[in-house]
Structures are given as structure tokens and as C-alpha cells.
Image (spheres, rainbow, N blue to C red):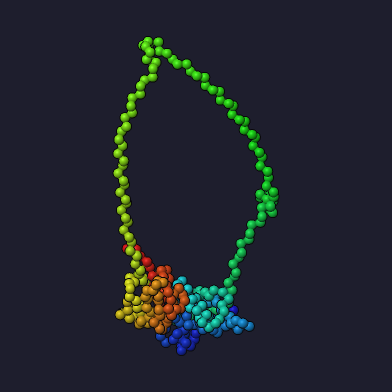
Amino acid sequence: MGFLRRIESRLEGVFEGGIGRTFRSHVQPVELARKLTKEMDDNKVISVQQVYVPNAYTVFLAPADREQFLAYEARLRTELAGYLTEHARREGYSLPGRARVIIETADELEVGTFGIAAEMEETPPPVAMESAPPADALPAEFGGGAAAPVAAEPPVAPAPPVAPIPPVAPIIDPFAVDSPDAFAPATPEPAVTAAVTPPAPAEPPAAAPTAVASWTLVWPGGEVTIGGNALVIGRSKDCDVPLADGNVSRRHAELGRSEEGFVLRDLDSTNGTLVNGRRIRSATIGAGDEITIGMSTLRIEQRHG
């Protein structure tokens, strides 16, 4: 099902964008999130055992509004899809497939106005891989059928016997001295054994310096090393991680260490805290997890000194 809704009320325009604004301003992501959940609620279908809601949403923006999101549009779509998934779970709705949000430009819209189309889109099941037929079911030209007998190689003839070498008569030197010791074997000289000095043992290789690992919280425009004390994240300049964002509370969240890694706790903020697109109250996180607070994305990195 597809629905294109235009917000035309000044009262709704405070959060959802309106056509009749006196002072026009750009659309904010929080307005899109609230309007998307409203579209989900308005288009629910009550079945026998489930309540189904759309899972595919298209947001139509004015060209100027679309341009302000270009730098982080992919991340914004992921965040909005995660917000919709969390809303469906909280309300007990059933999604026919994975929630997704796409953004398109509508030239006929003015700055500050937007439209949303919602529809149900079922995710197709994975295609099973077909097993290969047995070898005896294939035609003969493709290697099927019974295995052909291997032709026996002709037997190798045995090598002829080697004839023994006849003994060689000793050669007598006619100019040798005629004495009993003329043909006596020479007395071997005693062998001289040289003393061999064993090589000195090789020195063990020097031990490589041990790299010290540290953990760093990184966000656009800044970073801070995570020590033993918890870090407070918020809009206030007194916070350990100050974020200049109107969507961030003065004391928004707190990041501390635990035996399992790090614990992120929301401090009852106005707009909430997301980890990998999911809204949390408290969650254990590690390297690679994305923290979304307002319009800022933070992450934990491990560095070796």
C-alpha cells in the first residue's frame, strides 16, 4: 500500500514540517523520525493474531532540504530504520520484512515541507543451493555412468644380471729394488688430530618492546582517551565530551569501564541514545560499535602506543 501525506498544519509544522510557515526553516531529522512513526501507526493492519505495519518508507524532500543531508544521508537512513524497528517492537507490531528508509528529491516541495510514502514490502526467503546430481546420473560425455576400466600397463622386463668383474693381476714394477720389502705395504703414518674449538653460543635476540594498548573515544572534531573515570557526554561545556548540537541534552549520556568492556548509560536525555541504530537505556559496547547522540556519531578505537 502507498500513501503520500503532506503536512499542511502550522501546529504540526513545529515538529513535522508545514506548508504554511511564516518563518521557513530546513527539515530536521527528529521531525522525520516522529512523522515516520506516525505513518506506521496510521497504516497498521489488524490481523487474526498479529498487527502488521509497513516496513518500507520513502521520504520526499525539497532540493534544499535534501542537500543538507548529503554528507550523512546513508547513516541517517540507517538511524531512521533502526528507530522504526524499535518503535514497532515497543508497540508490539509485526513487520513483513526488514525496515528500510530511502530519501528522494521532490522539486515541487518547498523548504521545510516533506512527504512520506509507506508500504509493506516482504523480504524474499533465501534461495537454497541445488545439490549436484550423483555421478552415475550424468551422461557418459560428462563423466557419468560406471567408471571405465583402466588399461593395464605392459609388464616391465627384469634387468639382465650384472656379470662379475674378473680380478686384476698386480702390476710389478720392473725397476723396483729387488728386496723382500719391495712389495711390502707402506707403514701408515699416524693421523694427526687437530683440536676443534666449539663455536661460541649465539646471543639471544633482544626482546621486542611491549606495545601498550589504549582506548580512545572518537567523534567528528575531537577525541579523548578513556581512563579509569567515567566520561560524561553532553551539550554542556563542563562535560568530558562536549557536543555542540541542539538535539543533545546538557548531560546526555555516560561512558564507563566494566569487566566485560565499556558500559554506555543514557542519563534520561530528551532525544535518547542509540547504539548501532537501536535505542538503549544501558548497554555494554566495544570497539566498532557506533554511538549516535543527536546528530553526532561516536565510536571506540583501540590504539597501540
Q: Does the image show residue 87?
A: yes
Whether residue 46 sits left or right of residue 33 in the image: it is right
The image quarter in which residue 182 lies: top left
Whether residue 81 sits left or right of residue 298 in the image: it is right
The image quarter in which residue 235 lies: bottom left
Q: Position of residue 212 (x, y in %)?
A: 33, 64
Quadrant of the image for the C terminus?
Answer: bottom left
Report the residue that reaches farthest toward the bottom: 11
Of residue 153 and residue 44, the one placed in the foreground of this image is: 153
Of residue 25 and residue 296, the one placed in the foreground of this image is: 296
Of residue 164 and residue 139, the one placed in the foreground of this image is: 164
Q: Position of residue 65 (x, y in %)?
A: 44, 77
Quadrant of the image for the N terminus?
Answer: bottom right
Q: Position of residue 229 (x, y in %)?
A: 33, 75
- Give the residue drawn at x 33%, y 70%: 225
The image quarter in which residue 293 lies: bottom left
Q: Position of residue 26 (x, y in %)?
A: 42, 80
- Give the residue drawn at x 59%, y 70%: 124
- Give the residue drawn at x 52%, y 21%: 165
Of residue 122 and residue 61, the one placed in the foreground of this image is: 122
Q: Does the image show residue 222?
A: no
The relative height of residue 177 versus residue 29 in the rendered view (above or below) is above
